[in-house]
Image (cartoon, grey):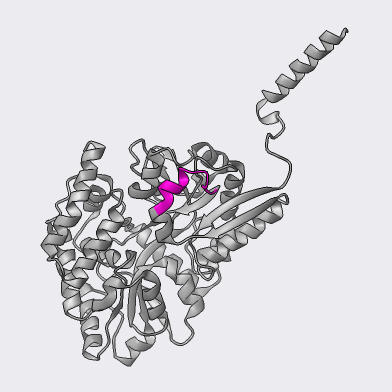
Amino acid sequence: MNKLTCLLAAAVLALAACGSGQDAPSAQPSGPRTLKLWHYETPDSAMGKAWAEAVKKFEATHPNVKVQFEEKGFEQIQKTAGMVLNSDEAPDVMEYNKGNATAGLLSKQGLLTDLTEEAAKRGWDRLLPGGLQTTSKYDDRGVMGSGKWYGVTNYGEFVMVYYNKDLFDEHGVSVPATFEEFTAAMDKFVQAGLTPLSVAGAEYPAQQIFYELALSKADRAWVNAYQSYQGKVDFHGPQLTYAAQTMADWVGKGYIPKNSAALKAEDMGVAFMNGKFPMMISGSWWYGRVQSTVKDFEWGTFLFPGNRLAPGSGGNLWVVPEKSKNKDLAYDFIDITMSREIQNLLGNSGGVPVAADPAAITDAKSKELIETFNKLTAQDGLAFYPDWPAPGYYDVLVAGVQNLINGSKSPSQVLDEIAKPYQDNLADLGF
């Protein structure tokens, strides 16, 4: 064989190796690598504990990789994700809010990686039942529930009422089973000089109370119309009118602190955990933190009295930005958070896992939380969140509910205020 023939043969072999698909050697660099991770769970929350352990497991199984973790605030990511993900500063994997207005919008803008193939290959689609897949999949319009996978949720969440058992016992208040009993309990606390509810109007908590009140007059058809555009929503109909009027009434009756329009979620949670309020209406994401923090009083939870529907869904998503430099590592990290080991830790730390071994959840409080979530899902009770239907709607609702708390606008004016961006979004989508 002459020299030219040898060179041609070598070239053919090299090309064959490059085009051999799964049998080809990895094109990834063999030297040290970095996985850039962002999430906004506090270290003492159930998710914070689980993700910290996932980082340790990831680094143990990827000896050439260092995880560069940056803790971001929910509000920070909510407001800057579009800009950051469209730059070279994008992380490799990050936690992001789910729904049409957030993950759906970014998927439509081409800023998120299509995870459909990975979801099938790694079995994420089999670990998440149909209802929990809703917020992971988005169509070409950015509407959740169908289309391609753009995120992976690995826990459940829902809104409930946290209560201070010691204050309930001290004032002779029983856990309410109906809405009427709930308001009677709050009246009793007001008469005793206690404001019943710890609330935060400058961030998400107050708008979730507003939504709970709307859901008390709603059914699944209304939720589908509001969230998925499967019907017309009348913003002056019975659901939202009742929510706006009752929210304003609750401030007047002393159920909600008048200064809460300026308070943030952290203020609300810390005040409840310090024993200053009998109740707090918020999400299961607080559960692990309350569980590990509260030592001075007994506490418990119950679903919003009288409601079959509650704000809730699969949890926030792991998303992989389109500009991620290490997508293969991002997929591996997500896979670890879906493992039995991490899911069991999540469940025993006060979270709601989606792929845990039920027999491995030994903590009594954690079992109670998971049973409540299962009860809610069994009755088709997850109604998503009020800010999901339209881009920027989170800030619209924060401002609207603040106006109800401050009394700076009437309920009717607030409903007009929140109706316009919703209707404008429908027009943009061609509905």
| 239 to the left or right of 280 | left
Q: Where is residue 209 shown, x and y percent of the image?
A: 27, 67
Q: Where is residue 74 shown, x and y percent of the image?
A: 42, 60
Closer to the camera in the image, 74 or 53: 74
The image quarter containing residue 59 is bottom right
| In the rendered image, the vertical position of residue 169 relative to residue 372, given as above or below | below
- Magenta segment boundaries in residue numbering: 80-91
Closer to the camera in the image, 409 or 344: 409
Quarter of the image that includes the N terminus? top right
**Does 399 lie within the magenta span?**
no
| 264 to the left or right of 12 | left
Q: Residue at x 15, y 64 (%)?
A: 242
Q: Residue at x 14, y 66 (%)?
A: 409
Q: Is residue 230 visible?
A: no
Q: Where is residue 405 shown, x and y percent of the image?
A: 21, 71
The image quarter containing residue 410 is bottom left
| In the rendered image, the vertical position of residue 44 relative to residue 122, given as above or below | below
| In the rendered image, the vertical position of residue 244 relative to residue 187, given as above or below | above
| 120 to the left or right of 387 | right
Q: Where is residue 404 shown, x and y percent of the image?
A: 19, 68
Q: Residue at x 42, y 58 (%)?
A: 76
| In the rendered image, the vertical position of residue 213 relative to residue 178, given as above or below | above
Q: Is residue 334 visible?
A: yes
Quarter of the image that includes the C terminus? top left
